[in-house]
């Protein structure tokens, strides 16, 4: 067991080794059980986490804030537009100054070509851990909750289990690609055979694809890309179908919508779920475009684990915070 995580940042999914992720999960399950039993677990008494948001959130904000309180500390919710960042506070200044006030700095910044760089520059200047609450490349805390949920549903031996990470149609906005990218990086380390399905215009970042193939080689798992959602889901153990924008092709919302609208039939519905194994699970990080991206019958149906998945955000993040900020 690798426990030397005190002071470490978590920005990209591979920042923690597989053994370190295993440690996070073990701590997360321990803290989950303690909360269930009403046992005290104030591992971060008197510690304060800054939560700096450049983009809206329901689950991420709620789970980090509740998690810090349950660990005996406090979380400060800071919306970027209420700060002096637009008036000149630089990344270095934010890292230096917040690093002196707080015991950890969590940031959500999903702007294309800006968010991940922002997190890394703050981390370079900060004396305390920087935790990624989602950037345009990664959503590592979502992915930790996802693997925690998959293990709870499918057991610890996931070798040869088939995980489908599929694009799905949405009409609301061009969603970030950080969730599928985190999934294809992390899941091979747990032995799962990953099938990535998307229409041709919805590729992920080439560098992330290379890293995912490398993880699959290293952990001797399958990694396949297909352009047919139905074909991808044959015999699946896990179907993780969600939308992302055609961001390698365009950032123009109107152009993106035209591309998205070509694929309205990419929806997670009962017929799609029937292609999976009998005990297939449906996953989505939420929020979803209900009855557009996924039908209500699937989202609220017997295969869906989305509420357990959302709950595990709390426990997984408590594991990370307890290990990095103690
Ligand atoms: N899954 C997720 O990150 O949810 P929020 O955007 O509501 O935080």
Image: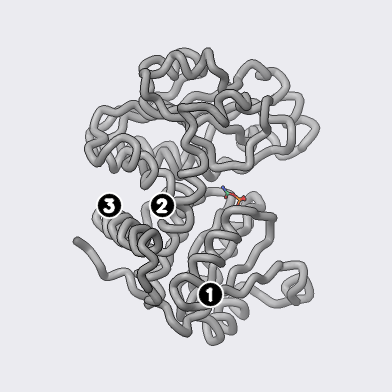
- Where does the C terminus fall, quadrant-wise? bottom left
Real-space CA distance between mark 1 and mark 3, rounded to the nearest whole angstrom: 25 Å
Badge 1: few (under 14), some or many (20 or more) residues near its Cα, within 10 Å? many
Residue 16 shows up from this direction: no
On the image, numbered disc 2 is attached to which residue?
13
**Of marks 1 and 3, the one in the foreground:** 1
Mark 2 to mark 1: distance in Å? Answer: 20 Å
Which of marks 3 and 1 precedes in the sequence? 3
Q: Earlier in the sequence, mark 3 or mark 2?
A: 2
Indicate yes or no: mark 1 CB to ligand 1 under 8 Å: no
Mark whose residue sits in front, 2 or 1:
1
- Residue 10, quarter of the rendered image: bottom left
- As helix, strand or loop, the secondary structure at mark 1 comes to strand
Residue at 52 percent across and 79 percent down: it is 48
Classify 10 Å Cα crowding around label 3: few (below 14), some (14-19), many (20 and above): some
Residue 181 visible in the shown view: yes
Identified at 46% across, 44% down, the residue is 308
Tell me if label 3 and label 2 are in contact, CB under 8 Å: no
Q: Secondary structure at mark 2?
A: loop
Q: Which residue is mark 1?
A: 49
Residue 93 percent coordinates (x, y): 62, 80
Closest to the observer, 308 or 104: 308
Residue 174 in picture, x, y percent from top left:
69, 38
Camera-nearest residue between 152 and 107: 152
């Amino acid at each position: 067991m690798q426990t030397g995580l005190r002071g470490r940042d978590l920005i990209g999914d591979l920042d923690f080794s597989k053994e370190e992720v295993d440690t996070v999960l073990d701590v997360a399950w321990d803290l989950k059980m303690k909360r269930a039993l009403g046992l005290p677990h104030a591992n971060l008494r008197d510690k304060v986490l800054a939560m700096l948001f450049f983009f809206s959130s329901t689950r991420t904000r709620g789970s980090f804030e509740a998690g810090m309180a349950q660990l005996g500390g406090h979380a400060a919710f800071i919306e970027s537009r209420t700060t002096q960042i637009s008036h000149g506070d630089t990344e270095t200044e934010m890292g230096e100054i917040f690093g002196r006030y707080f015991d950890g700095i969590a940031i959500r910044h999903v702007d294309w070509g800006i968010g991940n760089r922002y997190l890394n520059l703050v981390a370079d200047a900060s004396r305390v851990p920087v935790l990624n609450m989602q950037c345009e490349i990664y959503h590592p805390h979502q992915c930790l909750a996802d693997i925690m949920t998959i293990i709870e549903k499918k057991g610890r031996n996931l070798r040869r289990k088939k995980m489908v990470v599929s694009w799905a149609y949405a009409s609301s906005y061009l969603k970030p690609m950080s969730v599928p990218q985190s999934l294809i990086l992390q899941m091979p380390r747990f032995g799962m055979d990953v099938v990535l399905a998307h229409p041709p215009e919805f590729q992920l970042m080439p560098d992330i694809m290379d890293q995912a193939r490398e993880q699959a080689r290293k952990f001797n798992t399958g990694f396949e890309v297909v352009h047919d959602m139905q074909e991808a889901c044959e015999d699946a153990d896990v179907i993780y179908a969600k939308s992302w924008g055609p961001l390698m092709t365009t950032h123009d919302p109107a152009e993106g919508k035209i591309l998205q609208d070509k694929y309205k039939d990419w929806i997670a519905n009962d017929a799609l779920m029937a292609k999976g194994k009998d005990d297939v699970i449906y996953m989505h990080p939420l929020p979803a475009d209900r009855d557009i991206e996924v039908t209500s019958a699937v989202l609220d149906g017997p295969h869906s684990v989305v509420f357990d998945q959302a709950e595990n955000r709390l426990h997984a993040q408590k594991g990370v915070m307890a290990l990095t900020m103690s």
